[in-house]
Amino acid sequence: MLENISLKPYNTFGFDQKAQWFTEASSITEILQAFEKAYEEKIPLHILGGGSNVLLTQNLEGIVLKNNLKGISKLREDDDFIWLKVAGGEVWHDFTQYCVNQNWGGIENMSLIPGSVGAAPMQNIGAYGVELQSVFVSLEAIHRKSGEIKTFTKEECDFGYRYSVFKGPEKDLWMITSVVFKLTKRNHQLKTHYGNIEEELKGIENPTIKDISQAVINIRQSKLPNPAELGNAGSFFKNPYISLAQAETLKKAHPNAPTYPVDSETVKVAAGWLIEQAGWKGLIRENHGVHKKQALVLVNYGGAQGQDVYQLSEDIKQDVLKKFHIELKREVNIW
Ligand code: FAD
Ligand code: NAP
């Protein structure tokens, strides 16, 4: 285990905070060893994947355990479906491309989401109209204190919009070591009616899942900052869910507000639009700010501290609340 290590290469914001202890686990034994040290020395344990959804606001006491478990195995298949068990340390985007290249469908719309497979169920990752839960079968996790290995079914994960039980009642209790997916081998359910996908597919008569994956990659590359070039953690806030009555008030004042029905009582508003309307898009505060193409993305232009970005997010939250009476909630995990 390494002592006093900079986490700069391990978080996509590129914040230079230190971990008291740092280790990468490539086996269950190594994971259990780290758990034991944390338990015996009564020090905190932080589980890290690709670091693409965390905001480091301080040096971290205790152990940062990076998930480096690798491997993809076929559990079974029939004519229509394939069931794959994927280790939590696999890179999510690489896994999407592996599947796309085999013509296994279901996760192509989630191409280019950064991070690890093990973190994907945490917030039920989603993009372009598809969420992880649509292909999820189960996951295996280890209890951080007892070392118990448990299989969680889809029901037990209680997935919701950018939510799972691991962000609720089971928060900080488990480390996800593998995930089982069920993907289509034929009769793929293509989802092209979201964002600019159809536009990007113009000219392609019968798009394949590979075409859709490539379209999503193209759109994302044109709109989103690449964390390797500009520190960020993707969408900083979730899209707020508001009541029908609130949506009507919003629409009266702003007929162009992008709202999407969720159910008979709830409407989703694009948080990026609210932030942009409040005047924050492209704002720069010394070395950090709000991205010029996507107001939902806060960026580190180099040398900023996590505290600065946290304060910026707080100011945005308060301003949006004052102007629209809508509360923004952070998607990024604050450490
Ligand atoms: P980390 O940032 O390392 O960790 C995130 C949280 O999960 C932490 O609380 C951590 O403790 C916990 N965690 C990580 N691994 C485990 C594990 N194995 N067991 C238990 N807990 C664990 N998200 C979307 O949903 N859709 C998008 O389209 C999207 N686009 C993005 C675009 C960019 C440019 C960026 C930078 C981020 C984007 N994100 C998106 C957010 C992020 O990529 C996802 O949330 C991703 O799943 C985080 O994975 P990670 O391995 O980096 O997690
Ligand atoms: P966009 O296409 O500009 O759309 C803005 C917002 O409107 C999105 O957040 C999306 O909500 C919503 N939206 C658009 N079309 C919709 C539809 N037909 N039905 C319901 N909701 C719709 O969004 P973007 O910022 O470029 O992102 C594109 C996709 O990538 C989105 O799904 C977004 O969630 C995902 N993404 C996520 C992150 C992250 O860090 N979480 C970062 C970048 C991109 P949803 O977000 O609910 O889909």
Image (spheres, rainbow, N blue to C red):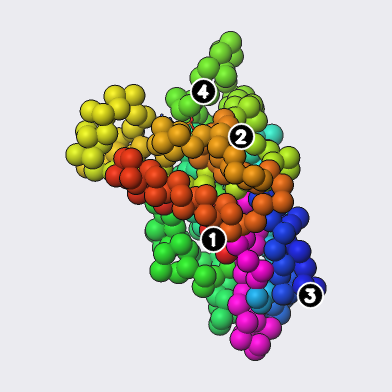
**The magenta segment:** 35-60
Ligand 1 under 8 Å from disc 2 Cβ = yes
Q: Which residue is mark 2?
A: 224
Residue at disc 3, CB closer than 8 Å to ligand 1: no
Disc nearest the viewer among 3 and 4: 3
For marks 3 and 2, the one nearer the N-term is 3
Q: Looking at the image, which is closer to me, 100 or 173?
A: 173
* Residue on which the image places disc 4: 196
The amino acid on which the numbered mark 2 sits, given as a three-letter code, is Leu
Question: Which comes sooner in the sequence, label 4 or label 1?
Answer: 4
Is ligand 2 less than 8 Å from the beta carbon at label 4? yes
Identify the residue position indicated by label 3 in the image.
3
Total number of numbered discs in the rendering: 4
Q: What residue do we see at 63% from left, 51% from top?
A: 52
The answer to if 53 sits in the magenta stretch is yes
Q: Report helix, strand or loop for mark 1.
A: strand
Q: Residue at x 26, y 29 (%)?
A: 253
Give neighbour class at mark 1: few <14, some 14-19, many 20+ (Cα, 10 Å).
some
Q: Amino acid at mark 1?
A: Ile
Where's residue 62, x and y in %?
A: 66, 77
Mark 4 or 1: in front is: 1
Kindly report the distance in space between the C-alpha atoms of the residues bearing marks 1 and 2.
21 Å
Which residue is labeled 1 in the image? 334
Residue 146 in sight: yes
Which SS class for mark 2? loop
